[in-house]
Amino acid sequence: MRSVTPTNPDSVAIRARRVSKRYGNLVALKGFDLVVPSDRTLGIVGESGAGKSTALAIFAGLVVPSEGEVTVLGRPPGSVPGEVGALVGRPSFPQNARVGAFLEYLAKLQLLPCPKEEVRIALERIGASAWTRLRFLDLTREKQRLVAVAQAWMGSPRVVLLDGALDGLDGRGRELARRVLADQRGRATILVSSDHPDELADVCDERTVMAQGSIVSRAGKDEAGVSNEGAWEGSLGPALSTLA
Amino acid sequence: MDTSAISARGEGIRPWSGKLRQAIVEAKHGTARVLWSARGPSLVAVVALCTALPALAAERGIHTRRAAAEDREHLAEVVVRFYDVDVARHLFQCPRSLETMVILALCFTPIVTLLLAYDSGLWREGDGIRFTAARASRGVLVVSRAATAWATFCVIALAVYAPVGLYEGATGLSPLSTVVTYTALFFGATCCVAAAYVPLWTLVSSAVRSTKMSLALGGLLMLLLAAAHTFVHAKLPDSRWAQILPGSLDQLLLSGRPDRMMAALTLTGGWVVTMLGAASRLSKRRDLA
């Protein structure tokens, strides 16, 4: 197993040190440590309840850690709005709002100079240019999920956090979301989580396995990003078996 | 698909100016959403029924000078039960319908502001909060949501004051300049009192976890403030310190004296900064996922 650790501290996009999160008696994260270099795509896998969503929610500034230290782009999470695109958990859109109008409002809130153009590009990415005038209640849950994926990329943020980005999507939606991931790979620091270990194999530079609120394993490809799936899977084997 | 031409993240924008722009975007979006939803029009209708309609109806039944004089005296007696003599004297000089209007409007201001702002500090999933919270700081969201509630209140107040002012001007019973001056003054006073209440409800909603709790706690606080107002008026009529509460600011605003009105504006500013500062701090500790 080869863990990719940056030598230049400036190239670190996300750093978490001994982070814990408790919800009452439930411990969602404990002693969580992670360093993610800039412009790398990191997959976080683990079964439901492993702490993936909590970790991403902390990086997005949506959840406050109980203990530990977290920085995103060198600053506390939530203090770099506009630099971070996020899809955490299963967020819902205001159902009466029109898709285009709501995304334009988000783009304006992000202080993007050309909100309409950003919305056009975001919807085009997921093959949904015709949805602009539709209300969210006119879209199936799956289509809403695709829009949620698309909004995370608006404004080309430097960090993109996608919690279960491929969950709840059918074949075509999954393919579109994967294509977006592949297109943007190397242009931003991307953290994407999934319950299924194999799902992220071909779209990530590294994979981290979580269980019971901690990282149990981390494996990466070589510096050139050449797929070395056999060795990768081999190195993950023992860690993945702990999830069974 | 070329995205390189688009400069992202508002680069080059100073932090305070960016936050101000974000607050304006959020407030405009929120105000439009409330006014186009069921809440906005229904509140306009209820407030109009409870304030403008009685104000206009009361004047229509008065046909003689004597009846008008008796009516004003009766109204003045009612006013001194709630306000000091300066206020009663000042209100006595203004057109009858506007006097009734401002008294009723100020009575309903706490409840209307509570109905507009009870959820301003709550983070509800259906509002798309996880999308907005990733783009703007919690402080910006709290302030802009309070601004939304206040701006919506001002629109509602304008919608009920304008017909009364127009009616009073059309009857020609008072000089047009007097009607315009008093309509503007009373509208401003009502909006100022609302500006003191809205941050309070925002703070309350930031401290609880559900809309029901927010409404219940807000309602309780509203009753306490009304009781404090009544107590202060009855037992401490000369105490200026007692007039710092939102429920007592109208004593200063309706006095007709510039120094006391300025004091009310300053106190309102103090309330806004203190309450929204506290609400912002509370919201930063809250989990959204």
Image (cartoon, helix red, strand yellow):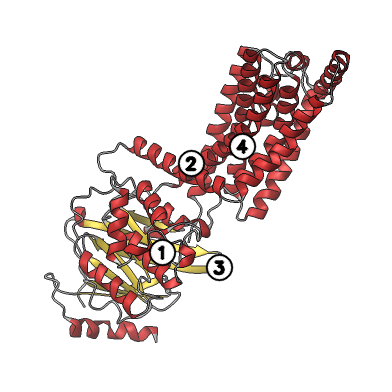
Residue carrying label 4: B156
The structure residue drawn at horizontal position 30% and vertical position 47%, both measured from the top left corner, is A112
- Write down the chain letter for disc 2: B
Q: Name the one closer to the observer, A88 or A93.
A: A93
- Give the secondary structure at mark 3: loop
State the mark number for residue A70. Answer: none
Identity of the amino acid at label 3?
Asn
Nearer mark to the viewer, of 3 and 1: 1
Give the distance between the C-alpha atoms of the residues marked 3 and 1, in whole angstroms: 23 Å
> In the figure, residue B264 lies in which quadrant?
top right
- Write down the chain letter for disc 1: A
- Give the secondary structure at mark 1: loop
Nearer mark to the viewer, of 3 and 2: 2
Give the distance between the C-alpha atoms of the residues marked 2 and 1, in whole angstroms: 23 Å
Counting from the top left corner in percent of width and height, residue A191 is at 30, 66
Residue A87 in sight:
yes
The answer to whether A198 appears left or right of B31 in the picture is: left
Residue carrying label 2: B144
Instruction: Check the image and report above or below for A205 versus B190.
Output: below
State the mark number for residue A25. Answer: 3
> In the figure, residue A163 lies in which quadrant?
bottom left
The answer to whether B44 appears left or right of A100 in the picture is: right
User: What crowding class fits label 3: few (fewer than 14 Cα within 10 Å), some (14-19), or many (20 or more)?
Assistant: few
Q: Quadrant of the N terminus of chain B?
A: bottom left
